[in-house]
Every structure is written in structure tokens, then in C-alpha cells.
Amino acid sequence: MIGITVLGATGSIGISTLDVLSQHQDRYQVLALTANTQVDKMLALVHQHQPKYVVMADPDAAEKLELSLRSAALSVVILSGVAGLEQVSALDEVTVVMAAIVGGAGLLPTLAAVKAGKRVLLANKEALVMSGSVLMNAAQESGAVLLPVDSEHNAIFQCLPEHYADGLAHVGVKRLLLTASGGPLRNLSASELYEVTPDQACAHPNWVMGRKISVDSASMMNKGLEVIEACWLFNTSVDTIKVVIHPQSVIHSMVEYVDGSILAQLGSPDMRTPIAHALAWPERITAGVKPLNLFDVARLDFEPPDLGRFPCLRLACEAAKQGGTATTILNAANEVAVAAFLEGTIRFTHLPKIIEQTLEAVSSTGAQTLAEILSADELARQAATRYITTVD
Ligand code: NAD
Ligand code: MG
């Protein structure tokens, strides 16, 4: 049995992961589940999957869960806080850690799993965007295997030959073609974008996801974060990555080779495919996903991104080129701005303005240590919080 910890178990990726795991109970044992505040949802998951450990990041939520479990006479070790998250990421009996906490809150638990040499299934792209060098160096030191769950990166991973880590040029790769649906607002004018509400931004045409990544998809910041994620995962630079708008989300990304070949991975837009792939790699297991019917798909469209209406993608590529803590600052400003947009404090079109102002105000430094990263993250959050009150 392969022991697994699911970080962010109550979220969209967490639930999809547990769905795949429940189809393969002969192979995987759920040892630990974590969440932030959602006690009722966690309670149902504990009954269903019977983990040995549960972590609620929020201490009050941990207390409430403890009370409910006591009355249900279920014996589970309940932990709380970042220390609890780090503990279940590094347990000896755990082989696989699904890193599916949203945002910068996922960094320390993901890093703990990497340092402990686990097989880390990485959904939490913000961790890599914040601190790519620290995570990648830690993986090299511990021997942790980092497998991409983000559908585009998982697709690229599937289209790459085995020894790509020595450099993409060595294995004849010319470019990575990162596909993007363009999100629910792809065809809106700049003035229409100003009026967009949180619910409209979260109404993704092809994927059902958490609200933060849904807003990122609508602003194209998600693609920007994914460009940075691809640079770290595939040891390459922004110049080798081309973003391609492909509204049907059937091709999940492509790899272009020097001989003119382009390899693509196709499938229904369902995260259980990349999750099952990363879980079983190099083997294959069923995922419960509806097979793709190419006759229903019928056509595939492609167009270039519009950086004028969607400046977040440009800002992310510029931060990636700048390097150091620029991407940490970008990520922190984006998290603060997206939270303010979801609360109704700012407009959709304010998102790139706040991020750009923060990038101008907070200087980028080296990003070799966790201390440098956490300090840049904190400074950027403070600056972005200030700009929220003055943006227009
Ligand atoms: P979600 O909002 O649905 O779930 C987030 C999870 O993180 C929840 O379990 C929540 O309890 C936990 N969490 C939130 N704040 C926390 C904190 N402070 N401490 C500890 N736990 C906390 O998000 P999601 O859509 O499942 O996305 C999770 C990650 O996967 C994100 O980084 C996202 O970018 C990435 N991702 C998601 C999808 C998708 O289809 N949903 C696709 C690709 C990548
Ligand atoms: Mg993606």
C-alpha cells in the first residue's frame, strides 16, 4: 500500500484526488487529510476515507472538528497550524504528498514534503512561483520527485522524453506551447471588463475550480503563473515558452521539436486525468474520466493572447525575466488583489494595476533562501494592501 497525504483535501483538486484514490483502494491508503476552516466538509471526508491524521490549519476549526469526532467515536490524530501541515507532509509512512493548498499558504507544507524526499504531486503552483529556486534545490538535495498536476505542465511532461532535465535543447525541444482557454472573459472589451463581477469571473467555460484560480484564469494571471511554473519544472526560460489560446481546452499543452514535430496531449477537461497520471507514473491507472469523443469536439481553434486587454500575463512574463524575488512579489500582490476583488472592494481591471504598482514599489532581491522569499512576500502584501485603497 502506498501511503498518501492530501494537502488541501476539501478543495477542488483535493476532492478530485480523493475520487481517484477511492477507485484504487487496493493500491493507496489515505493517511492524512488537511484543510483550513471547513469543518463539516472535513468531517464527511474523515468518515469516508478514515485517515490516521487530520490537520485543520485554523486552530478553532481543529477544536470544533475534535469535538465532533469525539461524539462520533472515531479515533484520528487531529493537529493544527502550519506545524501540523508540515508534520503530515513529512511522515515516515507517507510516500506521496498531493500539494493542493491554494496560494502562498501551501509553500511551507510543500517544502516540508520536498525536504522529506516524498513524491510530491504539485498542484499548488504559487509555491513554485514564490520560491522556485528553494523548492528545486531542496528536491535535488533530498531526491524528492516533483510531478506536475497542473494540466498544462502534466501534458508537457507527458510529451517530453525521459532526460529533459539536462536541458530542453539537448533533447531536441524547440519550444513549449502552453495552451490557455482564455477564460470566461476572453471576448469582452476593456470597458466591459471594468464591469465584471466576481461570479462572472468565476464562471469558467470548461473547468470547475476554486475561486482564486478561477479569477486568475479570467485575468490570464493563471497563464502567467504557469509560464513561471514551466520555467522551473522544465529547467528553461520564458523565451522558449509560447502561450496559445485554445478555447476548447481539449489540447492541454504541446511540445515543439527542432525537426518540426509537435506532440500534444489531449483529453476531456477533467483534473482527474493529470492527478491519476501523476499518482501512478510511470504506470497508468483509470481515473473515472469521460472518454474524449473527437467527433463531438469536431474542431480545435488557436489564437494568440491579447496582452493589451489581459496585462497580467505580460507582468508575469516580465517578472520571470527579471528573476530573483520579482515572481514572489508578483504572486503576493496578485493574491492580495484577487482577495479584494472577490470581496467586492476593487474592480476586475484594478488587478493588473495593483500588481504593477507593487512590482514597481518593492525591489526584487536574490531568492536563494526562504528568509529572502518570505520577506519579499510580506513586503509585497503590505504594499498591495495599501494600493487597494487608492487604485482607480
Ligand atoms: P480550492 O480553493 O478549491 O481549495 C483550496 C484548499 O486549500 C482547501 O482545501 C482549503 O481548505 C485549503 N486552504 C486554503 N487556505 C489555506 C491555509 N491558509 N492553510 C491551509 N490550507 C488552506 O482550490 P483549488 O482550485 O483546489 O486549487 C488548489 C491549488 O491547485 C491552487 O494552487 C491552484 O492554482 C491549483 N490548481 C487547481 C486546478 C483546479 O482545477 N482546481 C487546476 C490546476 C491547478
Ligand atoms: Mg493549468
Image (cartoon, rainbow, N blue to C red):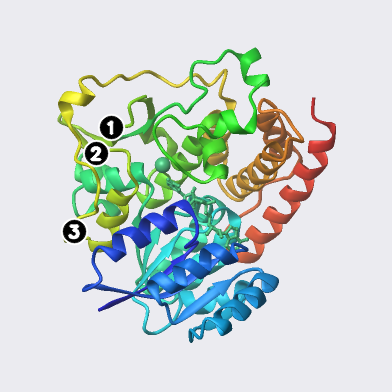
Name which residue type carries label 2: Gly
Name which residue type carries label 3: Ile
Mark 2 or 3 closer to N-term?
2
Disc ID at residue 5: none
Residue 41 on image: x %, y %: 52, 62
Horizontal placement of 6 versus 79: left or right? left
Q: Would you call the spot at circle 2 few (<14 residues within 10 Å), some (14-19), or many (20 or more)? A: many
Q: CA distance from mark 2 to mark 3?
A: 15 Å
Nearest the camera: 372 or 385?
A: 385
Nearest the camera: 59 or 121?
A: 59
User: Which secondary structure lies at badge 1?
Assistant: loop
Residue 63 on image: x %, y %: 66, 77
Disc ID at residue 250: 1
The quadrant the N terminus occupies is bottom left
Mark 1 or 3 closer to N-term?
1
Image point 78% across, 44% down: which residue?
385
Name which residue type carries label 1: Val
Residue 387 on image: x %, y %: 80, 37
